Image (spheres, helix red, strand yellow):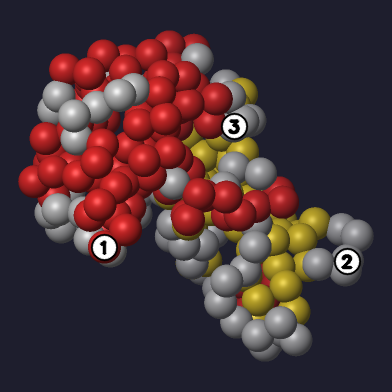
């Protein structure tokens, strides 16, 4: 699946980046703790198991211990197949055609978003999307406000695959949202908007999306 998607990804490089960003990225820490506790240690007997779960119960797993685990030969061997399988399963859920990925995003507004967007030269669309319609859930705004759902396609190269994968591997982040994290500089295509409750989609021409 990774080869079919034609993205620059390897499990080995993925683990190295987790290792590198562990000290300053909370999302990496949480994803790595989940990978170890709910995936790796359920398959493999490790010399680090007792200490890991002791620290986990106490509320803080030391980065030094996390690094010792992911740098161990048993973890490296396990990750090349088992972790790769989990990532392949995730990526198989994406809808991809002609190098483009279908993405969705929901927002709520207290004003007429369609009318305001039609008059604007630039439309702010954000970096946090979902790879499926049901995952487009607005987490900001008031439930009584009008809800809008964005539909678009984006090139595979405009997706931050590292962030996308860790956010979906860890249920704390990915279970409901099914998130796709985009790079800040991106180019959307086939952009349209559904005003929830309306039948028709709204499209815009000659707009800049950011």
- Picture coordinates of residue 134, whole percent (x, y): 72, 51
User: Tag 3's secondary structure?
Assistant: loop
Q: Residue at x 72, y 73 (%)?
A: 147
Q: Residue at x 59, y 32 (%)?
A: 94
Mark 2 vs mark 1: in front: 1
Q: Residues within 10 Å of mark 1 (few under 14, many from 20)?
A: few
- Picture coordinates of residue 72, whole percent (x, y): 15, 24
- What residue is shown with label 1? 58
Q: Residue at x 57, y 71 (%)?
A: 139
Who comes first in sequence, dot 2 or dot 3?
A: 3
CB of mark 2 within 8 Å of CB of mark 1? Answer: no
Q: Which mark is residue 94?
A: 3
In the displayed orientation, state which residue is furthest to the left: 64
Camera-side residue of 205 and 99: 99
- What residue is shown with label 2? 198
Q: Is residue 16 visible?
A: no
């Amino acid at each position: 699946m990774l080869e079919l998607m034609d993205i620059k990804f390897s499990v080995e490089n993925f683990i190295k980046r987790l290792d590198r960003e562990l000290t300053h990225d909370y999302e990496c820490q949480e994803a790595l703790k989940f990978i170890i506790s709910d995936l790796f240690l359920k398959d493999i007997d490790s010399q680090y198991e007792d200490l890991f779960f002791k620290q986990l119960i106490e509320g803080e797993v030391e980065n030094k211990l996390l690094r010792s685990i992911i740098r161990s030969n048993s973890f490296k061997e396990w990750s090349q197949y088992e972790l790769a399988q989990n990532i392949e399963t995730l990526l198989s859920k994406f809808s991809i055609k002609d190098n483009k990925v279908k993405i969705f995003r929901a927002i709520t507004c207290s004003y007429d978003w369609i009318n305001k967007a039609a008059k604007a030269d630039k439309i702010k669309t954000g970096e946090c999307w979902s790879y499926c319609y049901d995952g487009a859930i607005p987490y900001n705004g008031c439930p009584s406000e009008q809800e809008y759902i964005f539909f678009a396609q984006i090139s595979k190269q405009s997706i931050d695959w590292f962030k996308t994968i860790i956010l979906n591997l860890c249920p704390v982040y990915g279970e409901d949202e099914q998130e796709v994290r985009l790079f800040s500089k991106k180019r959307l295509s086939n952009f349209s908007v559904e005003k929830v409750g309306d039948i028709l989609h709204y499209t815009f021409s000659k707009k800049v999306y950011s």
